[in-house]
Amino acid sequence: MTNWTGTDYTYRNVTNMPGNITLLDKNGDRVPLKRYEVSKAEQSLGVWIAMDGNRKEQLKVMKEKAHVFASQISTKKVSKNDALYTYNYSYMKTLEYPMTALSLTENEWNSVVMPALRATLTSAKMAKTFPRKVLYGPDLYQRLEIRYPYFLQQISKIMAHIQELASSTQTGDLLELIAEAFRVEL
């Protein structure tokens, strides 16, 4: 529900919409539903989601994880390979889980991983300004094969679409219909 001002709209807040919504719980008792502002995020399946689509809470949580990882790897004495391996297969795995549900910009991803990446490079005895093209390049070309989160996000979305299209689910059927409608438009 929104308020139209003639050129723009704003979401209604809880005070503009009085009343309580109740649901039956497993025992058959009526329980009031919590009402939040549309900008308040709640955690659902490990991802912080707000109804208005803002990603502030999810970004905050991921940046906190980056700072925790940075402080942990900075205080340990690890080899170069262990530092890079831990970054790729421990820290990046915590970011990969919510990627499919998020649509972060390249700059947002860079700000999320910056503390962890800098600490990893320092632990690996490399300059913090190490060229990113070499850092994120594939092992095939003798690069370091560190995963670039912005590209991983795009790949995870493509993989989710393919998996849903391959399985006969309602989501897969909807994606197939959307693709067919897009083909008609072309």
Image (cartoon, rainbow, N blue to C red):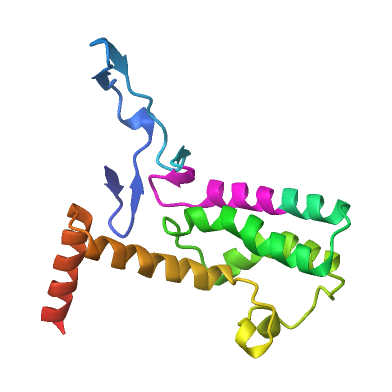
- Choose between 110 and 74: the one closer to the eye: 74
Quarter of the N terminus within the rendering: top left
- Choose between 82 and 64: the one closer to the eye: 82
Residue at the location (66% across, 84% down)? 133
Q: How many marks?
A: 0
Left or right for 84, reference 186: right
- Choose between 120 and 48: the one closer to the eye: 120
Is residue 40 one of those drawn in magenta? no
Residue at the location (41% across, 32% down)? 36
- Choose between 154 and 31: the one closer to the eye: 154
Q: Residue 144: x and y, percent? A: 69, 78
Q: Is residue 98 above or below residue 46?
A: below
Q: Is residue 173 above or below residue 25?
A: below
Span highlighted in magenta in the image: 46-66
Residue at the location (30% across, 24% down)? 18
Q: Is residue 134 above or below residue 52?
A: below
Q: Residue 106: x and y, percent? A: 55, 71
Residue pushed farthest bottom? 141
Residue at the location (85% across, 56% down)? 74
Q: Residue 117: x and y, percent? A: 73, 65
Q: Residue 84: x and y, percent? A: 73, 67
Left or right for 134, reference 167: right
Left or right for 174, reference 125: left
Quarter of the C terminus within the rendering: bottom left
